[in-house]
Structure formats: structure tokens, C-alpha cells
Image: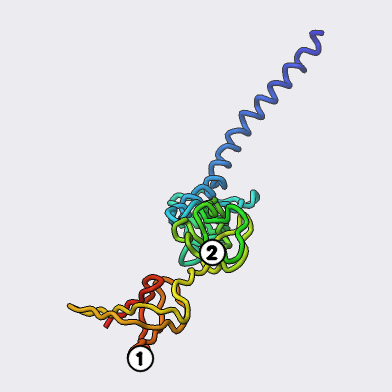
Amino acid sequence: MLKHRPIFMKLPLKTCLFLILCCPLISPANESFENHSHIRKLVRSQLLTLLDTSNGEYELRIQNIDQRLKLKKCSNNIDIQLTTEHVKTGKNTLKVSCNSHTPWRIFISAYIKQFTQVLVAKQPIAKGHLIQESDLILQRTDITHLHTSYFNNKQKAINYITKRRLNRGDIVSLKHLTKPILIKKGDTVSIIAKSDGFQINMKGIALHNASKGELIRVKNSKSKKIIQGIAVNSQTVRVTL
């Protein structure tokens, strides 16, 4: 038993010597390179400062850096710049560089999604339906690739007429709606002509359909003169002299 004790004692000693000699070499080697995770955090922070959060919420996905890429520790602040003039939803490319005695430069892609509250149909809505508040609901929606207009306020869509059928969950766009007809072609209307200090009232005939606030051409019933005014209500057209 005593003959084998020296051999047993040598094994832990070798292990200890290996750890003592190698660990100091490994640690400084790691510390001499930039941490990839830290660089990605810097990129994320830079993008967040460029985004207008009043337009909704954003989700960022930053490209991973190839683990085989060794970037020397930067003695100066790492510089991060967009390769385009403005940040945008979708794909962005950023130049990340170090300007020091051991300079380096890499390009990182970042994908940005934008979410906001969008008005959608709460239930199926038929074509020609007069929109009411109960027909609509605000829903958090990914608008990153949304190329149509949308509403984020119910009041802006109420009392419009649908131009086509909308399914439940469909985004309500201005292209889907039209204002209800206020004055129809052939209707008899009151023409109110206003100027500084006086007002003239006369009767006229509408020459085409018009919604509230739209321009409409009317014929003066007495003079037969054609006048253009604004449809105020179902019986009134206002003309400014």
C-alpha cells in the first residue's frame, strides 16, 4: 500500500499545476475581446433612442454575431450608425465600429416590428351598413407591413357607410368607407350666400349627390344660374361670396 501512495499524490498535484498555469492565460485572453452580447445590447439601445414610441410599440430582433469572430477590446466608445438616413420598420443595417489602435468594423442587421391599436370589425359588417360604435373594437395589431390606412379612434369611423362587406377582425380602412349621401341629385335645397355684413337666402336644385362637407353644384331656381357651395345638411348649401 505504501509503495502506491506517491503515485496517488502526484495526480492532484498535476491537476493543480495545470489550473494555476492555464487559468491566468485563459482569463486575460477572454477579457481582451469584446463581448458579443454587450455589442448587441448597445445596438438595441441605439435603435430605441431613434424610434418614436408615440406611434406605438416596437419589437426588436438583433442579429447574432458569429461566435468565431474575435473583436479586440475597444479602448474608445464603440460607434454605431445606421447605413440609411432614418430608422424604419422592417430590416435595418447598422455599422458597428471601433476607432482605436486596433480598429475593427462589422455590420449588424436589426429587424423592427411596430404594433399599435387599430380599429377592426367586431363582427361581420354588411356592405352599405351605417357604422355604429358597437360594430368596432380597438385591437393591438402588427402594422410593420400594413400598406393601407387605418383608424385608431372609433369616432373617426362612426356614421360612415361600408363600401364592401367586412369580416370579423378586418382592419377598418378609409378605402372601405364612404360618407352617407346628405343631398341627392334633384333635391330642393336652401342656398345661403354669406358675405361680410349680409346674407342672401334662395332656393335651388341639387345637380348631383353630396355628402356632408362636400362641394356641390346647385342651380338657382329663379335665375337658373349654377352655383357651387358646401353641403351643410340635407336641406342647406352654403355659398361664400
Q: Give the CA separation, mark 1 to mark 2.
A: 39 Å
Q: Residue at x 52, y 45 (%)?
A: 38
* Mark 1 Cα-neighbour bin, 10 Å: few <14, some 14–19, many ≥20: few
Q: Measuring from the top left, give residue 82's x and y in whole percent.
A: 49, 62
Which image quarter holds the C terminus? Answer: bottom left
Disc number for residue 225:
1
Which image quarter holds the N terminus? Answer: top right
**Marks 1 and 2 in Cβ contact (< 8 Å):** no
Looking at the image, residue 109 sits to the left or right of residue 153; the answer is right
Q: Measuring from the top left, give residue 159's x and y in whole percent.
A: 47, 62
Disc number for residue 173:
2
Q: Amino acid at mark 1?
A: Lys
Q: Measuring from the top left, give residue 175's x and y in whole percent.
A: 54, 69
Q: Nearer the viewer, residue 190 or 158?
A: 190
Q: Earlier in the sequence, mark 1 or mark 2?
A: 2
Q: Amino acid at mark 2?
A: Ser
Q: Measuring from the top left, give residue 235's x and y in whole percent.
A: 38, 73
Q: Residue furthest left?
A: 197
Q: Is residue 179 above or below residue 113?
A: below
